[in-house]
């Protein structure tokens, strides 16, 4: 097995939907799937508030104020915390620093491609996860994969953290965080 260069960071399911019937979101005219995997619904209402990192049933990573403050204290770059009108202590986390998914070593299954938006209805990546163009462990920080994974309106980039970030997050004992090694 290759060297571990970081960790895939995932949260728990919070039983809430970012895409609700009362909002308008960018979607393909042909397949009606979401076109923006970072879509933000400011009126999002969280159902399960016990986790420091969670994800909506469809799209969007949600973090607690405690998690946000940790990231701000550490001066992590490339992170955006979008406010919710009805959830003052929770924020949507959007990561902008990109790492490349290694398609040559990953087993990826693609669903049907829409001719309207040129997107697949599903992209499923099998374990183990590999990054390309990485020769040493990732620096302390948060990263996102260059491709989105999931099905239909659950397509989202994976959040990857550096080895030091992993260590610090574990030390803080945040609730709901799940880690999976990522290899070079």
Image: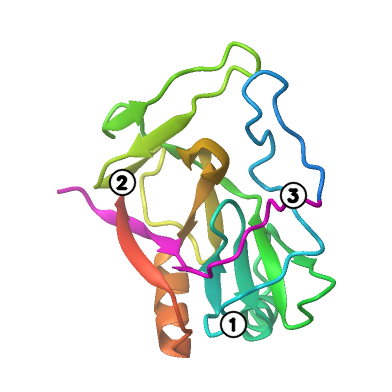
Q: Give neighbour class at mark 1: few <14, some 14-19, many 20+ (Cα, 10 Å).
A: some
Residue 162 in percent (x, y) is at: 45, 63
Closest to the camera, between mark 1 and mark 3, is 3
16 is within the stretch colored magenta: yes
Colour convention of the picture: rainbow
Distance, label 2 to label 3, CA atoms, is 35 Å
Q: Secondary structure at mark 1?
A: loop
Distance, label 1 to label 3, CA atoms, is 22 Å
Residue 30 in percent (x, y) is at: 67, 18
Extent of the magenta region? 1-22
Task: Check disc 1 and report the residue beneath it.
Answer: 49
Which of the labelled discs sits on residue 129, or is there none?
A: 2
Residues at marks 1 and 2 touching, judged by CB atoms closer than 8 Å: no
Residue 86 in percent (x, y) is at: 81, 75
Q: Name the residue nearer the viewer: 168 or 51.
A: 51
For the point 77% across and 41% down, the residue is: 25
Closest to the camera, between mark 2 and mark 3, is 3
């Amino acid at each position: 097995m290759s060297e571990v260069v970081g960790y895939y960071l995932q949260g728990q399911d919070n039983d809430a939907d970012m895409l609700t019937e009362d909002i308008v979101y960018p979607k393909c005219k042909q397949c009606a799937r979401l076109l923006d995997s970072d879509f933000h619904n400011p009126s999002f209402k969280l159902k399960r508030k016990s986790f420091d990192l969670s994800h909506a049933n469809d799209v969007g990573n949600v973090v607690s104020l405690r998690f946000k403050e940790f990231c701000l204290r550490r001066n992590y770059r490339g992170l955006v915390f979008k406010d919710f009108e009805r959830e003052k202590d929770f924020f949507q986390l959007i990561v902008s620093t990109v790492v490349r998914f290694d398609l040559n070593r990953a087993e990826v299954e693609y669903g049907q491609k829409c001719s309207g938006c040129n997107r697949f209805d599903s992209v499923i990546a099998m374990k183990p996860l590999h990054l390309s163009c990485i020769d040493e462990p990732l620096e302390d920080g948060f990263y996102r994969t260059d491709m989105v994974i999931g099905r239909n309106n659950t397509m989202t980039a994976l959040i990857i953290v550096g080895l030091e970030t992993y260590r610090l997050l574990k030390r803080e004992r945040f609730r709901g965080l799940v880690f999976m090694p990522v290899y070079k």
